[in-house]
Amino acid sequence: MGNKEVHRSLLTVPLIPLLILFTVFLLTGYHVDAENSYPVTVTEAVIQGKNVLVQSVSAAPPASDDGLYHLMAQEAYEGGTQGQEIAKASVSSDASFTFPLSEGTEDSRLYQKFVIVVYQSGNPVLVSNAQYITNPEAAGGKNVRRLDGGGKKGFLLDAHIINTTNYLTEAGIDQITYNLPIGNLCSDGNVAYKYNG
């Protein structure tokens, strides 16, 4: 047996069990359904005025030491039972939580996710999926209607054409794209701004 044949046979031996596992995986239809792995499902988190409404359902509500669901607000990098408790509701098949959005403040909930925790034997236990706010546009201060002109649009033109000719009006162009170097707007990169309220 040549040197190349030995290498080929060594490569095919580990592939056979992998092919068998892959075939079994495909035939059994094995999958993980993350939504149904918890006893409680958070169905929505929506902004209503200056508040947030979080709703949940459960076919079989979990046991709880104090008979309460504890709603936790988590940052994107947090998981499990981490976070800050922001609301409580009685354990039931459908629970609702309402709390302030606190937009523009240090305690803003706009970009947080929400999970439900219960206490069992004194320990916090995660019992729901995580849900972000699904209508963040409701917090926007300005809702401007989309402006769809009837003319041609989307041209990227040279600045000289824009300033020196009547080409745009003659061609029936209503909108153009113009690249503006951000360095022309900012001097020395020292622009004062206030972040998160």
Image: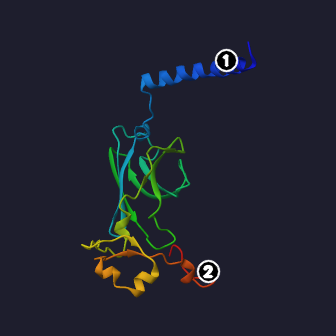
Depicted 80 relative to depicted 185: above or below: above
Name the side, left or right, on which 88 lies relative to 143.
right
Local crowd size for mark 1, using a 10 Å CA cut-off: few (<14), some (14–19), many (≥20): few
Depicted 159 relative to depicted 133: above or below: below
Residues tagged 1 and 2 counted as in contact (Cβ below 8 A): no
Mark drawn on residue 160: none
Mark drawn on residue 9: 1
Q: Which residue appears at 54% of the width and 22% of the height?
A: 19
> Which image quarter holds the N terminus?
top right
Residue behind mark 2: 189
In x, y percent, where is residue 130?
A: 45, 50
Q: Would you say residue 11 is visible in this rendering?
A: yes
Label 2: state its secondary structure. Answer: loop
Label 1: state its secondary structure. Answer: helix
Q: Would you say residue 71 is visible in this rendering?
A: no
In x, y percent, where is residue 71?
A: 44, 54
Name the side, left or right, on which 149 lies relative to 4.
left
Number of numbered discs overlaid on the protein picture? 2
Q: What residue type is labelled 2?
A: Gly
In x, y percent, where is residue 154?
A: 36, 70
In x, y percent, where is residue 53?
A: 35, 59
Local crowd size for mark 2, using a 10 Å CA cut-off: few (<14), some (14–19), many (≥20): few
Taking the view exactly as shown, the residue that stands out farthest to the top is 1
Taking the view exactly as shown, the residue that stands out farthest to the bottom is 164
Residue 169's image quarter?
Answer: bottom left
- In this rendering, which labeled residue sits more in front, label 1 or label 2? 1
Q: Which residue appears at 34% of the width and 85% of the height?
A: 166
Q: What residue type is labelled 1?
A: Ser
Measured Cα–Cα span from mark 1 to mark 2:
62 Å
48 or 160, nearer to the observer: 160
